[in-house]
Amino acid sequence: MSGALRKVLPVALAGAVLLASRAASAADFDNPKAKTPPRAKPQRRSGGESLPPLPLPATPLRRTERKRQPAPPALVGMITFSGQRFVIKDGQRVAVQTFPTTQIDIERLTRYANYKLGIRYRYVRTTLSAFSWDPVELPLLYITGWTPMPKLPDEHLAKLRRYLTDGGTLVVHAQCGRPEFVKTARREIARLFPARQLAPIDSDSPLFRSYFRINKMRVRSGKTWSQIRPHQSLQAVYIGCRPAVIFSPIDLNCGWDVVNNPIDGGILFHQDDALGLGVNIITCALANLKYARAFATEKVYHQQEDKTRDQLVIAQVVHAGDWDPTPHGLPNLMKYLAAHTTLNVQFKRVPVSLADDKIFDHLVTYMTGLRDFKLDTAEVGRLRQYLAGGGVLIADAASGRRGFDAAFRRELKRVLPKAELKPIPLASPLYEAPFRIRTADYTDAVKAVNADLNAPSLLGVTLDGALAVIYSPHSLGNGWEQIPYAWNLGYADADALRLGVNILSYAVTH
């Protein structure tokens, strides 16, 4: 990896200012693409006959008139911001946009995606003031620039947050990798979702495999080309199991059309790689829309505020990663548990920190996530004490993601260094009641990878003759939610619920 590219990665991974030591100021930077106009809208002319002024007789004359082609549905909304300032240029006072941007490259991506995916969509220019905030009308919003991103009004932040929660996707990237935009874009994303992480996207994300399988991305820094793994540059904020905000500190759109519209300098992806990633982003946004719309319907724990009296209450572990990607799963599982067992279930969930003594109030705790996480020393010690005292930890990797799987195995080894996470045999009483389980059905995404897998694949750690840790590398929570998610590497809904009931029944009776 070149020395120039090493200056790129800290920005993508830790938020450092991108090449700030040798970058010109935003006011001095002149983006050559800003001078290239977008393509003219297509027009059709139809022939018709008309008559010249009287007197008659007369020979009809031909005339042509413009007709507007029927517009395809909009897919991408490119956000523009109004406002201008005055600068002195060549001795003249001239007006310039407060937040300039370009649209020539998004045209190329839209045409390429339509061709590859066999769809017919278009992009539109819009503003946050004029936008309807309906993700069905416009599934994907797009913001790019090379100057500092404007600070959004609280009203627009609230509407944008609702739009993303309802199923929309926001793509934000820095043209030419400009540090002025990178820093301010991170600020606005943090204001948008202060309680959610903007963190690197794992290598097994559907963003890197939904249409094109992307293992490496070629990046040009100045005139030097290098290769990086895609997850080393892209970051996301997740809502549920989907990336709702996708952020790239490396230029995407200049790469979408850099052959036709060359640009010198800057930090940008190779055109082929940028186009492939762009198509994958569009594929995921469209495929996730139905899931996202269903996910937006909130499930209510109707006994959340009731006091607990000898009832089973689920405690969910809050950790440093995406700790709550399947929030609708536990209400459905509780309902199923109440219908198929005699357990006294309370429809209530208590988020708990492993650093809090309140964890000892619960016999059963549940833990899930999407990405890497790390427990601090106090959390490691408290979880060890909890398990040694008879508590049971149930865990699963949301949508079967490898990032959480690797982190969970690593952190569990810190908690129980002498214990081993082993497959739970089919002879275990866990598979006997209330359902006798010998086979298990998986999602189509799992079958595409392992068509022969037809048995449950739970893992466990045994302490004092009983399972203290029950872990599934395949998702249980997505199946409990019963919301179709195309990228779920997990159990089919019915078997996820049956396994969940058996796991909870085992936990409270052993």
Image: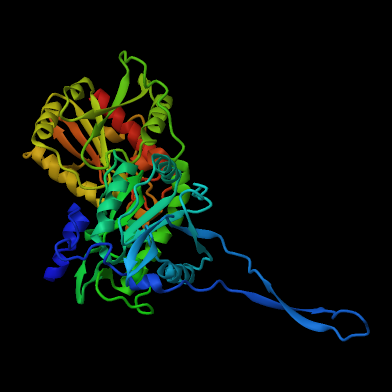
Q: Nearer the viewer, residue 337 or 183?
A: 183
Q: Relative to 164, say whether 75 is above or below.
A: below
Q: Nearer the viewer, residue 44 or 168?
A: 44
Q: In which quarter of the view is residue 463 placed?
A: top left
Residue at horizontal 20 percent and vertical 75 percent from the top: 225
Determine if residue 70 is in view: yes
> Please, which colouring scheme is shown?
rainbow
Residue at horizontal 40 percent and vertical 54 percent from the top: 444
Q: In which quarter of the view is residue 248 placed?
A: bottom left
Q: How many marks?
A: 0
Q: Quadrant of the C terminus?
A: top left
Q: Nearer the viewer, residue 342 or 97?
A: 97
Residue 247 horizontal/vertical position (percent): 31, 55
Q: Nearer the viewer, residue 274 or 79?
A: 79
Q: Quadrant of the N terminus?
A: bottom left
Residue 32 horizontal/vertical position (percent): 34, 73
Residue 85 horizontal side relative to residue 416, left or right: right
Residue at horizontal 21 percent and vertical 20 percent from the top: 361
Determine if residue 464 is in view: no
Q: Relative to 391, say whether 149 is above or below.
A: below
Residue 445 horizontal side relative to residue 401, left or right: right
Q: In which quarter of the view is residue 323 placed?
A: top left
Which residue is the extreme one toward the left? 418
Residue 173 horizontal/vertical position (percent): 32, 59
Residue 362 horizontal/vertical position (percent): 23, 23
